[in-house]
Amino acid sequence: MQQAQTRDELAAENGTGTVRTAAGTAAGTVLNRGLNVRHIRFMALGSAIGTGLFYGSASAIQKAGPAVLFAYMIGGAAVFMVMRALGEMAVRHPVSGSFGQYASRYLGPLAGFVTGWTYVFEMAIVAIADVTAFSIYMGFWFPSVERWVWILAIIFLLAALNLLSVKVFGELEFWFTLVKVAAIIAMIAGGAAILAFGFQIGDASAAPGLGNLVEHGGLFPNGFEGLLASFAVVMFAFGGIETIGITAGEAADPKKVIPKAVNTVPVRVLLFYVLTLGVLMSLFPWNEIGSNGSPFVQIFSGLGIPAAPHILNAVVITAALSAINSDIFGAGRILFGLAKQGHAPQSFGRVSRHGVPWMTVVMMTGILLVGVVLNAVIPEDVFLLIASIATFATVWVWVMILASHVAMKREIARKGLPASDFPSLWWPTASVLTIGFMVLVIAVLGFFEDTRVALYVGAVWLGLLVAAYGLWVRGIGRRRAHLEDETSPLPVVAKTE
């Protein structure tokens, strides 16, 4: 094993060969495959349920009205195609760096560098927002305690747990997601009960019923422009779902668990977004949702549950903890892959005796500590800006995933390689349409004034990355990543005489 690494390093130094970037090539650089089917399935489930649903959905509804249901279905279909593309690559090349390494392999080292660091940037922004949100939620129960106390406590707690082993991370996500899923199912069941039995909700101006979907300005009260505007919030809600692909490097059986996790995406979108919001807008006129507190609190209150605010607060705290946990995991594993490619300091490529890249966890902890300072100086209304910037970074990563997949499929056809074990659907039509949709979302960010700054920040960020690559990346970082192809070989039929 060590000799193989030495040959690769010598080849790189002599200007020949490619960079070996599988899970690791020497002791102390190999990740532990400790995630089983249950872990990854619930991680896939939990990645679609967060503050984007519990609070961001109200903003999307105000922009589009009931038509937001179409936005979630269209956005969900596009995200599913991204996940099928990522799933095909993850099963073929189950490595820790995931889409960062796929971009380096199929689009070139600069693309891999930009993609990987943009994802880290996205996770850092979202994580800072999440720790701040967590402190706000805790303030509901403990208003006399300073927010920074909660931020420090949760940062160090989750960092310590992430340093133990990847199995601990998987277990945390399992239980966090179980709480969120149970809460959403309860909300849907409660809302359905109100509709079926005709319970009256005290703070609603109209009686509950399906008619609320069309009786307050129609299905498209803000026109087609309102539908377009909602995509900025809708796509932010789906952000983080690509973490499924990152788990491939630590999955016990990637060929089994990754396809199962990816194929549940349409069901999750229909159940947790379309059905939930459909019930909400049937209970309350769309223009009242979010104006009298959280709509989810209103559901529980309508059922006569006085502890509704406390129940919801516990749920959103769980959602925030899950999001922070996933942010630390995702960014850390991408940094691990970047180090293997020569795109980040080599210290990020070292792992602990538990198989955890400990330096990446330490770095993410340091980034999150910035939230302690920002929480004191940044007003709460900056979250729309954060969401917009995160949306740009997310969509950029998705475009690079799709572009890498297109390049891979072309190489498979050109070289006559074995067909993938988990091929993407409706190739190439679906991939082309999905890329076009992602470009539309980026254009939408620039069209509306309240999200336009995200394009400026995104353009500056990409420019800085290109400059950093030109100034500091040398040696193996200038070469395409080498990824082992784990596709099942074609069966050999023996000749008969």
Image (tube, grey):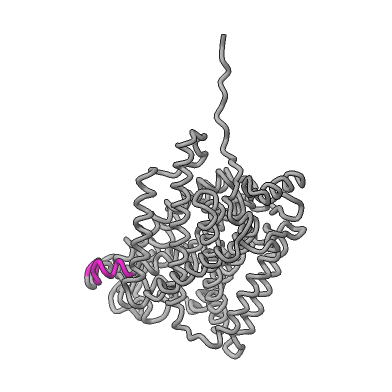
Q: Residue at x 35, y 80 (%)?
A: 202
As drawn, the residue found furthest toward the front would be: 14
User: Horizontal and vertical percent for residue 375?
Assistant: 55, 84
As drawn, the residue found furthest toward the top would be: 497
47 to 146, vertically: above or below: above
> Which image quadrant: the N terminus?
top right
397 left or right, relative to 229? right
Where is residue 426, by image quadrant? top left
Where is residue 207, by image quadrant? bottom left
Q: Which residue occupies the foreground of this view, 169 or 196?
A: 169
> Which image quadrant: the C terminus?
top right
User: Horizontal and vertical percent for residue 117?
Assistant: 55, 64
130 left or right, relative to 458? right
Q: Which residue occupies the foreground of this view, 474 or 353?
A: 474
Q: Which residue occupies the foreground of this view, 7 or 279?
A: 7
User: Horizontal and vertical percent for residue 349?
Assistant: 68, 59
User: Would residue 70 be counted in the magenta stretch?
Assistant: no
Q: Residue at x 47, y 62 (%)?
A: 185
As drawn, the residue found furthest toward the bottom would be: 144
Which residues lie in the magenta part? 218-229
- Whether residue 127 appears in this view of the structure is yes
Q: How many marks?
A: 0
- Whether residue 54 appears in this view of the structure is no
User: Horizontal and vertical percent for residue 396?
Assistant: 45, 62
